[in-house]
Amino acid sequence: MSRHHASLSRRLTLVLALLLLGFATLTVLLGRHLAMVQEQEALQRLSQGLARHIVGHWPQISTAGAGRAEQDERDALLQMLMVVNPGIQVYLLDAQGGVQAYLGEPGMVRQPQVDLAAVRAFLAGGPLPILGTDPMGGTQGRIFSAAMFSPAPGQSQPPGYLYIVLDGAARALVAGQVSQHRIWAGAALVAAAGLLATWLPGALLLRRLTRPLQQLAARMQAYSAAAPPTAAPQAPPPVGDEVHAIAQAYDGMTRRIEDQAAREARQTASHREMMASVAHDLRTPLTALHGHLEALAADAPAHSGRMLSAALAQSDKVRRLSQQLFELATLQSTDQVLHRERFSLDELVTDAVQKFDLGPGPAPVVLSGTPPGRLELDGDLQLVERALTNLIDNALRHAPGPLPVRVSLQRDGAQAQVLVEDAGPGLSDELAQRLAQGRSLRDPPMRRPGGGIGGLGLAIAQRVAQLHGGSLRPLPAPQGGTRLCLALPLAQLG
């Protein structure tokens, strides 16, 4: 049972709405904080000289006087200040910041010690707002105005400070009751309008952007290897998450491709087996036919000898092609060398060159270069000899002329390299490109201008090199012609 997935556009729209909601909330909270800080700075700046003004005009507020008359006068002054501005709280501090007097019920002061660091920063003209201690015991700092009392005659230390809390609890309570609901209602209205104005275009844009994914999922689900789409299929959009639908369609398409590859591999293997069987079945009648033609040519009169010679040449060509087809099909049906032995490659190269020097006159194949000494290989001697013979025979047939085919052997690190060079017209571009890239010369078959299935000798040599862990590649030929390098790994010592 498959799980239901919400569509990608819906999920993205929901994520967008949550992000916008979070952004709006953060913006409101940050704006409220900044507005509160700005309000505090404005109020403190406006009342910055309040305490200094009171100390300057009513010096009797100082705690220097200890008589009853002076205390009554001071309390009356404090009462007058509280009546004029009920939102403030006035405190008289000693030189160490302790609360000496205030207007209110006994026990209201829960924090009798005021931090003088904030007071000194205020008196020094520090940047506003500066938050000080709330003697009423609140944990939140309060904006204030402060002034230092003038020292008494004969004293160098000031007797204390006038400390006025500008946003006391009464003022904060009234301000919250008056404006809190209005602030939050306005913020909510602005946030809702912003969310709506941003979310609707964003949702439409996301839906438009995810529509190609939805269509792609439908096309992938509707794809069939038997009927490849020549145009976009008009399939209904997949239900659920587009990415999930694409993943499912991709899995299905991968399975179809893998099945198709497996079928093609079975067909290729069957084709190779059939070619090997056909080539094997042709060898016996072709060998018998070639023998009969040789017998007829030996006893034929002169006027029919030329026809029999031509028939013999064609018979030999067909016999050689059937043999090469059988060998190539056999080599392509395996991935390893079945008959391994250690042998000397330098001796094998010398013997292969000497096989082509049977007649009088200049040798058609010569060894060139400096002998590298003894080079040993672990592999199938018959296959390596067959590959080398095919390269030399191919060079002789495609590069006839007075110049011989040159064969050289050299060592390159852990590899032995057999070079076969001729002065012929060179390889075709496609053939040279396939050899350089290590691609098969038979799959897919190359098109030849004259038709036929040529190139079997090079294909056999390439396959032999690959089975031994080597390669067959073309090299630049400065003098023209073809220069092929059969590279084979040397045997490990020990």
Image: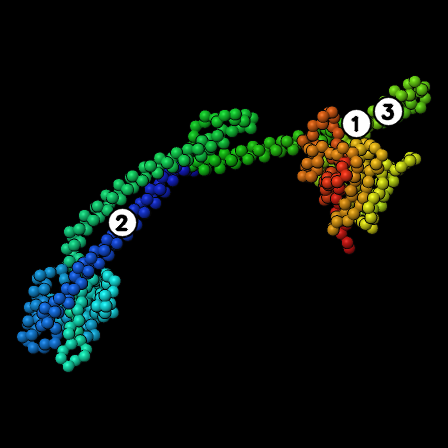
> What separation in Å lies between label 3 and label 2 (alpha carbons)?
101 Å
Q: CA distance from mark 3 to mark 1?
A: 20 Å
Mark 1 lies on residue:
281
Q: Is residue 429 visible?
A: yes
Residue at 15%, 67% in the rendered image: 52
Residue sitting at x 38%, y 37%? 206
Going from N to C along the chain, the mark reached first, 1 or 2, is 2
- Residue 64 coordinates in the image, percent (x, y): 12, 76
Instruction: Pick whichever, 240 or 482, lies toward us.
Output: 482
Q: Residue 258 or 359: which is nearer the viewer?
A: 359
The tag on residue 28 is: 2
Residue 312 got which mark? Answer: 3
Query: In the image, residue 231 lies at what x, y percent?
Result: 50, 25
Name the residue: 69% across, 30% down.
445
Query: Left or right of 209: which side holds 452?
Result: right
Amino acid type at mark 2: Val
